[in-house]
Amino acid sequence: MLVLTRKCEEKITIGKNKEIVITILKVKGENVSVGIKAPENYPIWRNELINNEEAPQEIANNANENTVMHENERAIAPVA
């Protein structure tokens, strides 16, 4: 496992073609908001949903106005 230290607005780029970008959006206490920019053919899951057969529907049902999305990005989880 590679362990990196990042500050707010700093990014980590993954992949040969730099197709995945992880951005630290906000740090508040022990909570960290992370933005993930990836091609749509890369499934991205929160670990607690991996074994949940209803995960895709649950994510769609729970999207709300607190979900942050930017152009050419897709929302992964609400930002508190």
Image (cartoon, rainbow, N blue to C red):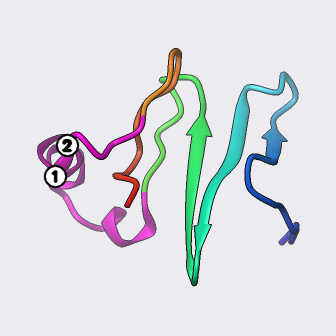
Exactly how many numbered labels are in the figure?
Answer: 2
Q: Position of residue 12 (x, y in %)?
A: 81, 46
**Looking at numbered disc 2 in the image, what kind of residue is underneath it?**
Asn
Q: Is residue 53 above or below residue 29?
A: above
In whole angstroms, how far apart are the C-alphas of marks 2 and 1?
12 Å
Q: Is residue 60 left or right of residue 38?
A: left
Percent position of residue 17, x then y: 84, 22
Q: Residue at x 19, y 43 (%)?
A: 64
In the displayed structure, 78 sits above or below 36; it is below
Magenta region: which residues?
46-68
| Label 1: which secondary element | helix
Q: Give the label on residue 8, or none.
A: none
Q: Residue at x 23, y 54 (%)?
A: 55
CB of mark 2 within 8 Å of CB of mark 1? no
Q: Which picture quadrant has residue 67? A: top left
User: x, y percentage for residue 77?
Assistant: 37, 51
- In the image, residue 13 lies at what x, y percent? 82, 39
Residue 71 belongs to magenta span: no
Q: Quadrant of the N terminus?
A: bottom right
Q: Is residue 58 magenta?
A: yes
Within-10-Å neighbours for mark 1: few <14, some 14–19, many 20+: few
Task: Decide if residue 64 is on the left or right side of residue 69.
Answer: left
Disc number for residue 58? 1
Q: Which residue is mark 2?
A: 64
Inspect the image, locate mark 1, and give the three-letter code of the amino acid beneath it.
Glu
- 12 relative to 48, above or below: above
Q: Nearer the viewer, mark 2 or mark 1?
A: 2
**Residue that appears at 74% across and 46% down:** 9
Classify 10 Å Cα crowding around label 2: few (below 14), some (14-19), many (20 and above).
few
Query: Which residue is drawn at the image coordinates 43% and 30% (left, top)?
Result: 69
Closer to us: 8 or 57: 8
